[in-house]
Amino acid sequence: MLVDDVFAGRDHHVGDTITVMDHPFRICGIVEHGKGGRKLIPIDTMGDLMGASGRASLFYIKSDDPANEQAIIQQIHATRGLEDFPVQTMEEWLSEMTPEKIPAFNISLNIVTGIAVIIGFLVIFQSMYTAVLERTREIGILKSMGASKAVIVSVVLRECGVLALAGVVVGVVSTFGVRTLLFHLFPTQHFEITALWLLQGAAIAFVGSIGGALYPAWMAARKDPIDALAYE
């Protein structure tokens, strides 16, 4: 068996034995990644293991120039017996592997995201509500010194905003840290993190935190200064 350099990593070397489809194979060489697979065995051997000797389900053809891909497809379809043979470029095939092409994937992802937002909203609401109760006397002092409702609401929301910003930074750093860890544990897996996902996650976290703090902030602004000062 041949393996690519990504699969080999630090754990596999020439001469090692690995098991594929319940059959042991000895690594006889390591090739550069990008050959279409991590592990490469003779096609005859694969046919015997799958019970499909002399047959193939997929052919990879590498063109000398991407500009010639359509010409190659036309030539294949012009060959007798291959008129209806499905032929795709790698770009077209990869476009079908996106979440939009996988049934119910986006629905499941949106449901999970929605549940996470609701839980985060409730946690922030409870935390800020508790913080307002613990600072009732401080709020009473501010109001007795002439602080308006807008000032009180602004103080609570600014504190929540700072905490949300710190949480976003910690979350982004943790995300890249987890990806690095998973890459070392599973080098053959690719974990993509895009700027759009980071922006969406940050926006959801920030808006959710401010939304969860609105009612506690308004509740703090409505407190009577005398009652707040007498609170224990």
Image (spheres, rainbow, N blue to C red):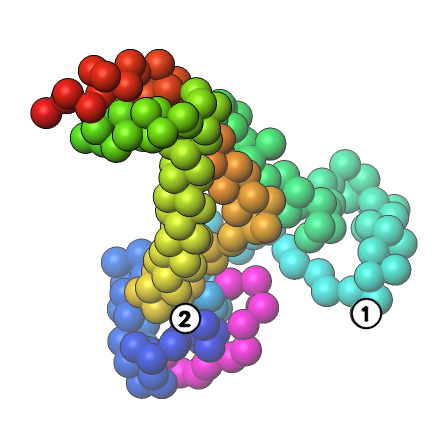
Is 45 a magenta residue?
no
Q: Secondary structure at mark 1?
A: loop
Query: Between residues 17 and 120, which one lies in front from this camera angle?
Result: 120
Q: Is residue 1 above or below residue 228?
A: below
Q: Secondary structure at mark 2?
A: helix
**Badge 2: how crowded within 10 Å, few (<14), some, or many (20+)?**
many
Q: Which residue is mark 2?
A: 7
Specify the label residue 33 is tagged with. Answer: none
**Badge 1: how crowded within 10 Å, few (<14), some, or many (20+)?**
few
**Quarter location, residue 179:** bottom left
Magenta segment main secondary structure: loop
Specify the label residue 64 is tagged with. Answer: 1
147 to the left or right of 203: left
Is 32 a magenta residue?
yes
Q: Do callouts 2 and 1 mark residues in contact (Cβ within 8 Å)?
A: no
* Range of residues picked out in magenta: 27-37
Query: Between residues 78 and 128, which one lies in front from this camera angle?
Result: 128
Q: Residue at x 28, y 30 (%)?
A: 141
Q: Residue at x 57, y 51 (%)?
A: 194
For this orientation, the residue located farthest to the left is: 232
Task: Count numbered badges in the picture.
Answer: 2
**Quadrant of the drawing holding the N terminus:** bottom left
Q: Residue at x 54, y 72 (%)?
A: 33
